[in-house]
């Protein structure tokens, strides 16, 4: 494993929070990610998340359990501020891991499994728009070239 690879978080299109996972990550890297995620939850602002796991080969059962514990510990914050999360999952093994995680702890907010970045961003923009965050939804669509896919009426 490349120990220099880390989980990256991009909030440049806030209230869209993009998280990109490397092919593998360490437990300390996961803890750093969870700590940063908690900071976003504590902002007290509604947001939508997109987790890009297309490079991720697998996570350990310990890492999946820790993720489930984190969701349980902060369920009230997720319910209050998260509009949902789209997970980009292209690997059958990762899809299984996602199902295990959701089985261990059902998501407190909507969760969408997307097969591509455009599909995830389309869903995220729809979630923002449904919450009345029209300008951020439009910004996400514009940034990812999704304006043609926008629903009207």
Image (spheres, rainbow, N blue to C red):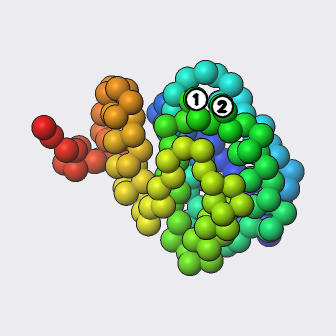
The one nearer the camera, 117 or 78, is 78
* Residue 59 in picture, x, y percent from top left: 74, 67
Q: Quadrant of residue 82?
A: top right
Point out which mark residue 80 bears.
Answer: 1
Farthest residue toward the top?
Answer: 44
Task: Determine the residue positioned at 57% across, 71% down.
Answer: 95
Q: Circle 1 sits in a helix, a strand or a loop, which is it?
A: helix
Can you say which quadrant of the picture contains the N terminus?
bottom right
The answer to whether residue 85 is seen in the rendering is yes
Relative to 46, residue 117 above or below:
below
From the image, tell me which residue sits under label 2.
Answer: 77
Q: How far apart are labels 1 and 2 at the CA level? A: 5 Å
The 10 Å Cα crowd at callout 2, few under 14, some 14 to 19, many 20 or more, is some
- Quadrant of res 114: bottom left
Q: Residues within 10 Å of mark 1 (few under 14, many from 20)?
A: some
Between residue 9 and residue 60, name the one nearer to us.
60
User: Is the Cβ of the residue at disc 1 closer than 8 Å to that at disc 2?
Assistant: yes
Is residue 30 among the parts visible in the rendering? no
Secondary structure of residue under mark 2: helix
118 displayed left or right of 16: left
């Amino acid at each position: 494993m490349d120990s220099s690879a880390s989980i990256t978080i991009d909030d440049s299109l806030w209230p869209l929070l993009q998280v990109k996972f490397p092919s593998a990550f360490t437990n300390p890297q996961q803890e750093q990610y969870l700590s940063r995620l908690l900071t976003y939850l504590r902002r007290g602002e509604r947001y939508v998340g997109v987790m890009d796991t297309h490079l991720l080969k697998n996570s350990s059962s310990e890492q999946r359990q820790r993720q489930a514990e984190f969701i349980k510990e902060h369920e009230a914050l997720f319910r209050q501020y998260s509009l949902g999360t789209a997970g980009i999952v292209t690997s059958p093994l990762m899809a299984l891991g996602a199902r295990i995680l959701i089985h261990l702890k059902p998501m407190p907010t909507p969760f969408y499994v997307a097969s591509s970045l455009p599909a995830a961003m389309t869903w995220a923009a729809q979630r923002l728009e449904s919450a009345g965050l029209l300008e951020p939804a439009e910004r996400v669509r514009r940034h990812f070239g999704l304006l043609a896919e926008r629903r009207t009426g």
